[in-house]
Image (cartoon, rainbow, N blue to C red):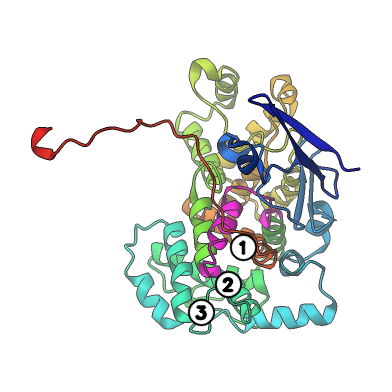
Amino acid sequence: MANTAELTVDGKSYSFPTLEGTEHEKAFDISNLRDQTGYVTLDRGYKNTGATKSAITFLDGEEGILQYRGYAIEDLAAKASFLEVAYLLIYGDLPTKDQFTQFETSVRRHTLVNEDMRKIFDGFPVSAHPMGVLSSLVSAMSAFYPDLESGKEDNTDLHIIRLLAKLPTIATWSYKRSLGHPTNYPKNQLDYIPNFLNMMFSLPVEDYKIDPVVVEALNVLLILHADHEQNCSTSTVRLVGSSQANIYSSISAGISALWGPLHGGANQEVIEMLEAIKADGGDVSKYVDMAKNAKTTGFRLFGFGHRVYKNFDPRAKIIKKAADDVLSKLGVNDPVLEIAKGLEEAALNDEYFIQRKLYPNVDFYSGIIYRALGIPTNMFTVMFAIGRLPGWIAQWKEMREQKEPIGRPRQIYTGATLREFTPLESR
């Protein structure tokens, strides 16, 4: 017999079923709570609320575990390409060789963006944040494909391919214009990440050599960012999609959610913090002491600890090696990155940080890598969005296939009670 949870309220008892996931996560099913009792739950930020059942990503913050479709993130980062992981997240299994060839070929064939999209892009000021531009242009994509019909799934695979193929192209536009450089068209003979790097960094006046160490580092970074359970942006994609909004509108909403400094903007804040420390003389020990006395100083270190992981972020272990490889290979001599190394050493060896499990997280190391590659700070979150795109797509697709009802959170009203209206002339 299934377990039930008993709730007693106003002298009456109610029973609610319990659920257990495949990795033994336990939940109370309160779907009928309001209908039965007249009560709702108050859970600010939904930290204790499961809004859906999902078979995509498993995360155990206490044990430091992250798995995509049952595959350990450590294995995927070491052995898979980003597009393989994208296929896995979206379709449920790693592709066969033939499936991957077809998938990769389709992505290559759709990298070009409609030239009329450039006219929309040209309407943005040069100072526009790349994330605002990216969100707007992805939303505008729905206007360019008359085969897109909200609520119908016949063309879903084609729209998925278009998003995966075109997002990197669009993402490079803001960067190139910020430098006053011409934008580059994609080269479909190149693989996914080399193609992106070529669009970002090549110039028409000279040949651009793609460094395999850089390609591997970005491949790992994108895989580590590809999905992360029901976070803010992913939940936004599912919530918007639950209204039967099309895939472009839903992904655009996810990009906007990711833009926030408490979510995808964290790696940008890491570099801004490091630059502030440099401007103040670069005394790492001073800022470590300030972090230890945060209640007095008001200073906290960005890029350390995690809201979900109560142990070492498993992604950080992987990305640390990628960061070390990139810095070693490129021979970067950057005082800001030297400060980062100092903070990392302090956090990994100081008992204050060890006891509180304030280890460097994925945002800390990703910011370091992007900085070393010459990617500007305001593009960091765009890079995050490129990596997270397969996860958003997978979550949107799963939500549609499960025919989930439209999201409609409740609230506890705390405003004024009924008041009598007074005409304007009497107020």
Secondary structure, mark 2, is helix
Number of marks in the rendered image: 3
**Residue 185 circle label:** 3
- Magenta region: 224-248
Is any atom of residue 269 visible in this view?
Answer: yes
Q: Give the residue displayed 67% in from the left and 37% down from the top.
A: 48
- Of labels 1 and 3, the one closer to you: 1
| Cα separation between marks 3 and 2 | 16 Å
**Residue 389 circle label:** 1
Q: Amino acid at mark 2?
A: Leu
Q: Is residue 246 above or below residue 235?
A: below
* Label 1 Cα neighbours within 10 Å, binned few <14 / some 14-19 / many ≥20: many
Residue of label 2: 163
* Label 3 Cα neighbours within 10 Å, binned few <14 / some 14-19 / many ≥20: some
Image quadrant assignment for residue 94? bottom right
Q: Is residue 383 above or below residue 346?
A: below
Of residue 389 and residue 33, the one placed in the foreground of this image is: 33
* Label 2 Cα neighbours within 10 Å, binned few <14 / some 14-19 / many ≥20: many
Q: Give the residue displayed 60% in from the left and 35% down from the top.
A: 41
Q: Amino acid at mark 1?
A: Leu
Image coordinates of residue 324 in percent, x first then y, are 72, 47
Image coordinates of residue 120 in percent, x first then y, are 36, 73
Q: Amino acid at mark 3?
A: Tyr
Q: Earlier in the sequence, mark 2 or mark 1?
A: 2
Is any atom of residue 208 visible in this view?
Answer: no
